[in-house]
Image (cartoon, grey):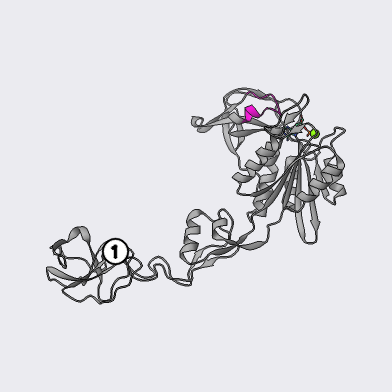
Amino acid sequence: MITVDAAWGHVERCSRCLADQLVPIGEALGLRLSAAVFSRVDSPPFDKSMLDGFAVVSSDRSPTRKVIEQVVAGGVPHHAVVPGMAINVMTGAPIPEGADAIVKVEDVRHLDEKTIEMPTSGVAHGKGVLPRAAAFHKGQEVLAAGRPLSPVDIALLAEIGLAEVRVISRPRVAVLATGNELVKAGWPVERGQITNSNGPMLIALLESEQVRSIDLGIGRDDPAELRRLMGEGLAADILIVTGGVSAGVLDLVPGVLQELGVEQVFHKVRMKPGKPLWFGQYEQAGHRALVFGLPGNPVSTLVAFEIFVKPALRVLRGESFRPPASMRGVLTAQVSLRGKRPTYYPCRIHFGDRAAGLPKVEPLAWSGSADLAALTRANALAVLPVQEAEFAVGDQVEVIAL
Ligand code: AMP
Ligand code: MG
């Protein structure tokens, strides 16, 4: 059995950033740019009006102007503006030649259909005009390499005319729940059976990580069936299998994975819950897959996902490896550790309620690794080291936010 630190070392060593690919901008949210993006255009592409109003010559002091044309956004002016004249422009319309300022429509008075009276204060040079390339110019770097694309970044890509963008590929993660006792949610449950909750949880966790999941459903504890389903899952970048990695007579997953050519990297980690965790790597014809065999109990599955799968996913997506971020908090109740393994304990961080400058951390009533209901009340896992068996009210602990 290895420590969590040693296990992180192995996961880091085996995880590689995925190759890049060209994807439509509509599918690029959250993905990282594999190269910097340089603009192919000036923004704005022409001097444009920021107002609905009248394009005029600002140095012209005549109190009224004759309106010679109207230009909407998307249109182009056909005349130049000279003293005594104005062109009615809408927001986004190109600035007509000769004009250097826009008077707001609200600031003029219409004397007749074709004549306007200027405001007595006149109009300052440049007012209402957004000059060509004011935001950025052609050839300028607009987005740095490695950046995860936000909705606004996607808008910027569209603005510069890119329909596709080169990004680090989105990881594909296959999920297989194993166990003879498992039934798909919504189906009748006979005596001895339970519903598969890990599958839907993992798919949802992956979705919140913006990962594309491949649901392999439920596999019975049968070598041929496991071989077929896990063989399919090895085509993904990560295969997550739950159940079947402990010491029971039907814990067949490690054996079948090794038959399929997956190299075992470690099996069993000194942690609670999650001890039976199995981790391996697979390489064939240039394709690499990481395989996580998570213990079947749902809390173990969640903890192992948070502690090990997420850091690996980050590396595949182009980030550097890091264990889950933690913060310090102060316990509001006593907790005792049973056993000799560091424990990830479901708790609730009260961010607005502080003691000694730190948020309070409430350990939740928890009946063990099958207790999903306790997890629904949790927003964090307290990391309780083995050096102490008892944690008292007021003790400071590390917590990992969920
Ligand atoms: P295992 O890791 O296969 O020994 O399973 C450990 C415990 O987790 C057993 O009580 C299983 O019934 C339960 N379990 C296994 N897989 C699932 C699952 N997909 N959803 C809910 N509970 C599960
Ligand atoms: Mg099982």
Measuring 67% from the left and 54% from the top, which residue is drawn there?
316
Q: Position of residue 319 (x, y in %)?
A: 63, 54
Majority SS type along the magenta span:
loop
276 over 128 or under it: above or below: above
Q: Is residue 208 left or right of residue 66?
A: right
Residue range of the region highlighted in magenta in the rendering: 365-375
Image quarter where the N terminus lies is top right
Measuring 54% from the left and 62% from the top, which residue is drawn there?
144
Q: Is residue 201 magenta?
A: no
5 over 150 or under it: above or below: above
Q: Position of residue 64 (x, y in %)?
A: 13, 68
Name the quadrant where ligand 2 sits: top right
Q: Which residue is labeled 1 in the image?
A: 90
Image quarter where the C terminus lies is top right
Camera-side residue: 363 or 187?
Answer: 187
Q: Residues within 10 Å of mark 1 (few under 14, many from 20)?
A: many
Looking at the image, the residue that sits furthest to the front is 188
Query: Does the image show residue 342?
Result: no
Camera-side residue: 210 or 311?
Answer: 210
Camera-side residue: 189 or 21?
Answer: 189
Identified by mark 1, the residue type is Met
Query: Does the image show residue 89?
Result: yes
Q: Position of residue 192 (x, y in %)?
A: 78, 25
Q: Is residue 76 left or right of residue 212?
A: left
Camera-side residue: 195 or 62?
Answer: 195
Give the quarter of the image for residue 77.
Answer: bottom left
Q: Position of residue 180 (x, y in %)?
A: 80, 33
What is the tally of numbered marks visible in this picture? 1
